[in-house]
């Protein structure tokens, strides 16, 4: 047993030491595997970053109330009377003053110019009441102050401010004939709210001629489970019949469409490329076996077993693939991790979401796994050939 | 034994290597075919847009409404040849996830405006103008949901409500239309604006946008500025742009994601070809001695050059053509599930032709260096090299 181990180790070391003789072929394999991993990880990092930004935005103890079947805030219409009825609903937490913690909101899209491309893009402009910011986790002003109720002032999410033109502190922004002053910038723990513009609800309603119109109501629940009571309350009242959904569930659904699409694109592509690089790897390993034919035969002639030549070849292939995988992962990390992109939000949302590409250890693990599979399959058949090669043929080759 | 046989024998002298190279090339061109088709479909809306069509939207954003009164005022502007208004219905069938593109239009003028894109039979024309609750359903949408002309279908809206509180409208399919040009997508439906406007509970007398055709492309700039000046400083300011520019800026909203995907996949394509090219160079190098023998036998340098080039081009085509076939099958299979997102997804003949051109170029480039070396090879060196 020990001798097999020692033999295997010896053959592996010989193989690796002779790698520089097959430098170009080996480099081609390393590059090919590296690219496969880089492509896969780029897609996965994109999907992951998008998913985290959007899905991470929702809280389980916040209920969102939308028009039945409307799917997204932008489509929804909630009437003034319905807002009042919802505020009286069960399961809603009340503040120290005894008032329900709710926020009826208007959600519009406005045009702005993207800095990087100079093209127009849809941005969300949200009108919210005095409790609006408090119903969201981790809202903090990074500059300036909150808008004053009743005035033409806006506060702008940090991500939006850096991606789009004209939202610096103190600047005046024009939406149609209405003019607004940017009085503050806010962060929101990297959530989707950092891609929004906020204004005072009544001002927005009047300047956009939507007096008395609302699109959604957010409400803090006494507990995440209390949403069932609110749902039942809405379903049983014919004046309501609204969709009641937890904010977490709403955003999870919004994120899933787009990130599913990215993943559905990424994996098949990476697998197709893996086949391509497999061809390269097999090629490299076969030519490695061919180049080492005399050497392998000599080893066998002096008593080395077929198993050690088999493992030695397989190890060479696995190591090349692993190096490629690591380089691919590292390159993706350097180029794309933290890369800021913006796109049209998933689901029914019709406005831009700014997000960062995010690699994670588990994603890198997936990438390396794919690399090792390529290395394993790419090494297996050449290794079998090496192990089975007749000694005589090798010595005369 | 003619040269072609020699070429084939050379290529398959190591069967496994040849097969692997062919598979790699196959995958590379399958990727190319799919990527190019996706890119084409993604920008198809811009290609479809003709130069003399303009789009008028609310200046704040295209989702903000315009008053219906603008319709007649814009129509009266000198240089406007045809015009229709459009209202976004936000339609779905039975379940909100069964999203449908449904638009409320001015039936008569809409058909005139889109006559260059779609085929409307005379019966369909009169029926759509006459029937207030009638809808025209595009051929692809009809097929997708298994509907027939004459069916009564309930279409729900994720935005609008009827005055009785219902979110659903009952329509009669009074006709269908097919595409006149390949880029035109028919996976949508249109309804008469009057019926929609009278029955909805809010948003009365508002529309989403206007599309118009100018008398000539030369009139575009003048018409655009005439419209936007007319409504400047009004509560509903407009932004008028050519349909092409409008579609382009809309596509740009998908943002750098599309660009990144394109770059990454493009890099993959190039790398696979580089790996194969490298292998090909080595395969010819291996045969140095043999080429020396052929030269001794009297093969001319030019003939050897042609044979090596022929081999690499043959390899590229053997991999690339089935690769295009795979791309075609893939595209056809995902087409239906992406119908609402990328309606014109298909492997167009010119994409296929470009791919074949690339295959030949690839074959020539990978063959060129080894072929050139083989041609110039000195017999003595060749036989001496082992």
Image (cartoon, rainbow, N blue to C red):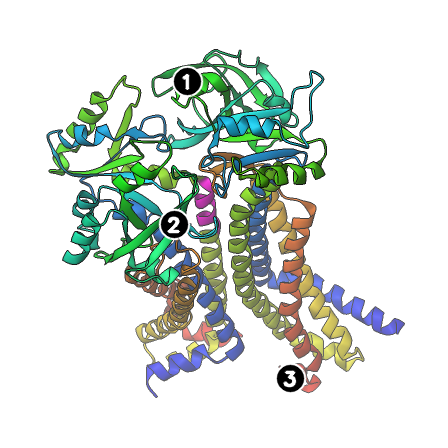
SS category of the residue bearing label 3: helix
Circles 3, 1 touching at the beta carbon (< 8 Å) = no
**Residue A172 falls in image quadrant:** top left
Disc 1: host chain: A
Q: Residues within 10 Å of mark 1 (few under 14, many from 20)?
A: few
Q: Which residue is mark 2?
A: B155
Q: Which residues are magenta?
A: B256-264
Q: Is residue A324 magenta?
A: no
Whole-Å distance between the Cαs marked 3 and 2? 80 Å
Depth check: B301 or B227 in front?
A: B227
Quarter of the image containing the N terminus of chain A?
A: bottom right
Q: Quadrant of the C terminus of chain A?
A: bottom right
Q: Residue furthest right?
A: A2
B262 falls in the magenta region: yes
Q: Is residue B377 visible?
A: no
For the residue pair B233 and B121, the one nearer the viewer reads as B121
Residue plotted at (45% across, 66% down): B25
Q: CA distance from mark 2 to mark 1?
A: 32 Å
């Amino acid at each position: 047993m020990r001798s097999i181990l020692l033999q295997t180790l010896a053959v592996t070391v010989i193989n690796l030491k002779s790698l520089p003789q097959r430098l170009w072929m080996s480099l081609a394999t390393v590059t090919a595997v590296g690219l496969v991993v880089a492509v896969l990880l780029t897609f996965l990092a994109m999907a992951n970053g998008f998913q985290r930004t959007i899905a991470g935005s929702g809280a389980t103890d916040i209920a969102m109330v939308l028009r039945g079947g409307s799917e997204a805030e932008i489509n929804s219409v909630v009437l003034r009377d319905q807002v009042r009825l919802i505020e009286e609903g069960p399961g809603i937490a009340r503040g120290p003053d005894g008032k329900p913690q709710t926020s009826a909101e208007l959600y519009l899209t406005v045009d702005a110019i993207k800095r990087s491309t100079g093209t127009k893009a849809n941005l969300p402009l949200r009108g919210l009441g005095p409790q609006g910011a408090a119903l969201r986790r981790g809202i903090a002003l990074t500059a300036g102050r909150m808008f004053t109720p009743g005035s033409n002032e806006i506060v702008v999410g940090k991500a939006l401010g850096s991606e789009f033109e004209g939202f610096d502190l103190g600047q005046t922004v024009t939406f149609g004939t209405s003019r607004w002053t940017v009085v503050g910038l806010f962060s929101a723990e990297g959530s989707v709210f950092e891609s929004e513009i906020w204004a005072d609800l009544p001002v927005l309603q009047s300047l956009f001629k939507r007096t008395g119109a609302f699109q959604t109501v957010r409400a803090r629940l006494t507990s995440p489970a209390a949403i069932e009571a609110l749902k039942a309350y809405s379903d049983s009242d014919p004046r309501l019949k609204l969709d009641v959904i937890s904010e977490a569930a709403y955003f999870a659904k919004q994120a899933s469409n787009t990130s599913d699409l990215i993943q559905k694109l990424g994996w098949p592509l990476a697998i197709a490329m893996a086949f391509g690089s497999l061809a390269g790897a097999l090629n490299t390993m076969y030519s490695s076996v061919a180049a080492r034919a005399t050497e392998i035969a000599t080893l066998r002639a002096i008593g080395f077993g077929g198993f050690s030549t088999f493992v030695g070849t397989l190890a060479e292939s696995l190591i090349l693939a692993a190096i490629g995988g690591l380089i691919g992962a590292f390159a993706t990390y350097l180029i794309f991790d933290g890369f800021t992109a913006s796109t049209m939000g998933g689901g029914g949302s019709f406005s831009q979401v700014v997000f960062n590409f995010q690699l994670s250890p588990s994603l890198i693990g997936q990438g390396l796994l794919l690399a090792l599979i390529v290395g394993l399959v790419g090494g297996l058949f050449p290794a079998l050939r090496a192990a089975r090669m007749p000694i005589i043929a090798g010595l005369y080759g | 034994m003619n040269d072609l046989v020699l070429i084939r024998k050379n290529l398959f002298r190591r069967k496994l290597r040849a097969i692997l190279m062919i598979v790699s090339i196959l995958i590379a061109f399958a990727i190319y075919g799919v990527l190019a088709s996706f890119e084409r479909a993604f920008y198809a809306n811009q290609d479809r847009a003709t130069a003399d069509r303009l789009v008028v939207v609310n200046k704040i954003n295209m989702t903000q409404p315009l008053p219906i009164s603008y319709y007649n005022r814009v129509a009266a502007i000198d240089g406007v040849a045809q015009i229709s208004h459009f209202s976004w219905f936000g339609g779905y069938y039975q379940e909100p996830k069964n999203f449908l593109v449904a638009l409320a239009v001015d039936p008569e003028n809409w058909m005139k405006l889109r006559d260059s894109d779609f085929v409307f039979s005379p019966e369909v024309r009169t029926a759509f103008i006459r029937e207030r609750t009638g809808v025209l359903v595009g051929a692809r949408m009809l097929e997708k949901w298994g509907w027939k002309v004459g069916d009564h279908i309930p279409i729900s809206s994720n935005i609008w409500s009827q005055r009785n509180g219902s979110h659903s409208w009952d329509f009669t399919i009074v006709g269908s239309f097919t595409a006149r040009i390949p880029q035109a997508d028919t996976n949508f439906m249109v309804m008469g604006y009057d019926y929609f406007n009278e029955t909805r509970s809010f948003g009365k007398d508002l529309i989403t946008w206007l599309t118009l055709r100018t008398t000539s492309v030369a009139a575009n700039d003048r018409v655009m500025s005439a419209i936007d000046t007319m409504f400047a400083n009004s509560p509903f300011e407009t932004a008028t742009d050519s349909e092409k520019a409008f579609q382009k800026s809309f596509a740009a909203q998908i943002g750098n994601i599309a660009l990144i995907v394109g770059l990454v996949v493009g890099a993959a394509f190039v790398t696979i070809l580089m790996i194969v090219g490298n292998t090909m160079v080595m395969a010819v190098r291996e045969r140095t001695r043999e080429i020396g023998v052929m030269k001794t036998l009297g093969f001319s340098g030019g003939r050897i050059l042609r044979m090596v080039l022929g081999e690499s081009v043959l390899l590229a085509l053997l991999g690339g053509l089935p690769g295009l076939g795979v791309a075609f099958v893939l595209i056809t299979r995902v087409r239906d599930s992406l119908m609402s997102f990328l309606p014109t997804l298909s492997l167009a003949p010119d994409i296929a032709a470009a791919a074949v051109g690339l295959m030949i170029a690839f074959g020539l480039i990978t063959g060129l260096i080894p072929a050139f070396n083989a041609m110039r090879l000195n017999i003595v060196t060749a036989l001496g090299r082992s």
